[in-house]
Image: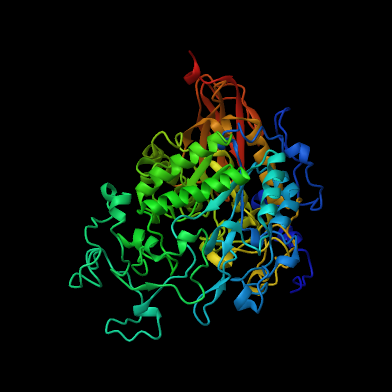
């Protein structure tokens, strides 16, 4: 295991000596200790007390009943189980014999299993609860193909997205019984569990004669399995439009033809390529129907454009024929089972945009109806549509039937502003687009918001790439402020595990999937983490870390004041050439206004902000809230990279009867 860096002076102390005072205040401590009397919050950590004790669970939890709590009240914590905690080293190889290319375990390689499991996750629920998370987004836990990839390009299914058995837990992660233990333990703490699911594809098992079979000698042999379109390779000819007629009477897969009667005529699957299952893998998938090539598109690699986005193979993964009624029914049955057996509280749905809309129009209502019958009335499903354009995201709430999708628009807007790339009027364009989503997202309040993730990379890493000369103190301050904005703007905050420990990724994908337990990966362990002496070679469950404490503190404020989760949001101030952003949230029951103001610049600012004419006697929850200047007007002094929250003592006029 790599050793810690040898340093003549602790890094936080060096920051104290070198950072500007304006940045230091926010970078090395949590926000000022101004709160209401009934606020349940942890003590703040300051730079002079780096080992201060963590808040007790009773100070930070107090979650309402998970079954009746609306999704917008939650704070979500996301992790890949393999990278979180190793509770049982006996399952590290998943019971597979052989070497790393057989079982997929290599804790020194960022692309292989590292040993995290469900037992370890269960043992760390205190840590998650103390952070203030009330829901856990659990990365995929299904049995995966251990290793995929050509010679020299191999990696493992540690991430969970290369599924062979949709009904069982991957043995590297534990057992079905251990999953049940974990979910029950989370529920006992009033913490929800959202399961990451995949309906678009399975593991890469199916091959095509023309490009994969070394014994194939046909004249149509090709070097790569490029995408073959429906127009050039129709379902009713073998090979291309000039080929022999096949699948007589099949009318295609448009919505009006997605019937059992029509698909019964799709007898052959060799319309584009000749698909086959390599010897020894004929029955590798569960349920058994997944082993039949007719339930896949078999058209080659996607280009992520046009129809190939729906029909093409995603990096070689077998793309399911989700227009086929059998596939629709089969997927509904599979995921009803996970609700029935484990009482999951919701699903995060992978690769949403690569599945046809009519599938979602059947699948989503079926999941909601089944969950309600199982006593889960607030079943929460959110799709992954990797696009920062709110118009592209809104199509899935307007057309496909999603109540919400992961808010890549939020991520981009916050990154642009907090990184210094854009001024705060960038938020105007982002928030104006909330109307596109319709009523489903409650004006964006149910949208899962996030700063970074396991695919795109971590927020701190992206800001560092954007500003390579930025000091550690300023990077920490900006990262903390971004978490504050996520906690109090509209939406459901999602924290990516490791962000609360100051992880700074080198890049995206595998480079942003560091262990929380001690890592043996050199390209992880050479990273300088924010706010700590530790590296990823250490166990990183430090409840005294300044980001952990800040998130716990702001989550407690959010939980104590429903306006900050359920309330309407109204922008109060943005600047074309400045760094202040102010907005109000309104208590849905009492009408009280909460004013939140953030300074995204390195200079202290004093700004005048308009508020509701009936708001008065602003009480501070964070920072300082002076008396009003006049009716509907307040001046706030905001330190660099700071965030202030003020609560009115009287209801806003917009709520007057």
* Extreme-left residue of the structure: 242
The residue at the point 31 percent across, 66 percent down is 268
Q: In the displayed structure, does residue 343 sit left or right of residue 119?
A: left
Of residues 67 and 130, the one drawn nearer to the viewer in this rendering: 67
Q: Can you see residue 398?
A: yes
Q: Position of residue 183 (x, y in %)?
A: 67, 46
Quarter residue 596 falls in: top right
**Quadrant in which the N terminus is drawn:** bottom right
Q: Position of residue 580 (x, y in %)?
A: 52, 42
Q: Can you see residue 575?
A: no
The residue at the point 53 percent across, 65 percent down is 509
Of residues 244 and 145, the one drawn nearer to the viewer in this rendering: 244
**Please, which colouring scheme is shown?**
rainbow
Of residues 76 and 279, the one drawn nearer to the viewer in this rendering: 279
Q: Position of residue 436 (x, y in %)?
A: 36, 39
Q: In the displayed structure, does residue 603 sit left or right of residue 550?
A: left
Of residues 634 and 83, the one drawn nearer to the viewer in this rendering: 83
Total labels drawn: 0
Q: Position of residue 566 (x, y in %)?
A: 54, 31
């Amino acid at each position: 295991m790599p050793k810690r860096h040898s340093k003549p002076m602790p890094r936080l102390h060096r920051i104290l000596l070198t950072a500007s005072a304006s940045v230091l205040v926010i970078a090395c401590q949590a926000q000022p200790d101004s709160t209401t009397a009934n606020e349940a919050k942890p003590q703040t950590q300051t730079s002079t007390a780096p080992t201060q004790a963590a808040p007790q669970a009773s100070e930070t939890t107090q979650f309402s009943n998970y079954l009746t709590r609306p999704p917008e009240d939650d704070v979500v914590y996301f992790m890949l189980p393999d990278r979180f905690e190793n509770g049982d080293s006996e399952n590290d190889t998943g019971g597979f014999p052989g070497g790393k290319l057989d079982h997929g375990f290599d804790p020194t390689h960022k692309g292989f299993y590292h040993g995290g499991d469900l037992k370890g996750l269960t043992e760390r629920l205190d840590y998650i609860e103390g952070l203030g998370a009330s829901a856990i987004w659990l990365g995929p836990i299904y049995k995966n193909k251990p290793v995929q990839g050509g010679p020299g390009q191999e990696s493992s299914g540690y991430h969970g997205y290369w599924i062979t058995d949709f009904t069982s837990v991957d043995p590297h992660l534990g057992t079905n019984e251990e999953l049940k233990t974990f979910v029950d333990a989370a529920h006992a703490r009033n913490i929800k569990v959202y399961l990451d699911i995949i309906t678009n594809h399975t593991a890469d098992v199916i091959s095509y004669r023309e490009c994969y079979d070394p014994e194939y000698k046909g004249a149509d042999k090709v070097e790569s399995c490029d995408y073959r379109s429906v127009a050039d390779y129709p379902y009713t000819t073998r090979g291309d439009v000039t080929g022999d007629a096949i699948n007589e009477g099949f009318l295609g897969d448009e919505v009006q033809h997605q019937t059992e009667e029509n698909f019964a005529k799709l007898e052959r699957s060799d319309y584009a390529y000749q698909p086959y299952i390599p010897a020894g893998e004929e029955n590798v998938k569960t349920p058994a129907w997944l082993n039949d090539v007719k339930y896949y598109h078999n058209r080659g690699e996607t280009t992520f454009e046009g129809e190939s986005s729906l029909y093409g193979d995603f990096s070689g993964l077998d793309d399911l024929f989700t227009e086929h009624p059998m596939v629709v029914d089969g997927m509904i049955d599979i995921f009803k089972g996970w609700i029935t057996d484990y009482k999951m509280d919701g699903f995060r749905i992978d690769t949403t945009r690569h599945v046809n809309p009519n599938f979602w129009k059947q699948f989503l209502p079926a999941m909601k109806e089944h969950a309600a019958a199982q006593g889960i009335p607030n079943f929460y499903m959110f799709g992954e549509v990797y696009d920062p354009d709110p118009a592209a995201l809104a199509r899935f709430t307007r057309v496909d039937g999603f109540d919400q999708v992961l808010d890549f628009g939020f991520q981009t807007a916050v990154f642009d502003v907090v990184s210094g790339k854009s001024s705060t009027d960038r938020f105007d364009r982002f928030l104006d687009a909330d109307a596109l989503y319709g009523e489903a997202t409650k004006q964006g309040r149910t949208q899962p918001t996030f700063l970074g993730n396991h695919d795109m990379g971590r927020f701190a890493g992206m800001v560092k790439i954007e500003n390579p000369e930025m000091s550690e103190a300023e990077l920490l301050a900006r990262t903390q402020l971004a978490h504050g904005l996520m906690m109090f703007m509209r939406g459901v905050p999602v924290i990516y595990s490791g962000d609360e420990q100051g992880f700074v990724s080198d890049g995206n994908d595998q480079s942003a999937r560091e262990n929380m337990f001690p890592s043996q990966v050199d390209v992880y362990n050479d990273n300088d983490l924010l706010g700590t002496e530790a590296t990823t070679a250490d166990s990183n469950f430090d409840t005294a870390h300044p980001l952990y404490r800040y998130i716990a503190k702001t989550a407690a404020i959010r939980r104590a004041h429903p306006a900050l989760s359920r309330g309407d949001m109204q922008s109060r101030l943005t600047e074309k050439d400045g760094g202040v952003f102010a907005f109000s949230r309104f208590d849905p029951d009492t009408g009280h206004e909460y004013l939140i103001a953030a300074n995204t610049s390195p200079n202290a600012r004093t700004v005048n902000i308009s508020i509701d004419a009936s708001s008065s006697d602003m009480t501070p929850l964070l920072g300082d809230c002076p008396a009003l200047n006049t009716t509907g007007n307040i001046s706030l002094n905001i330190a660099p990279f700071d965030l202030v929250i003020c609560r009115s003592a009287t209801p806003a006029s917009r709520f007057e009867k």
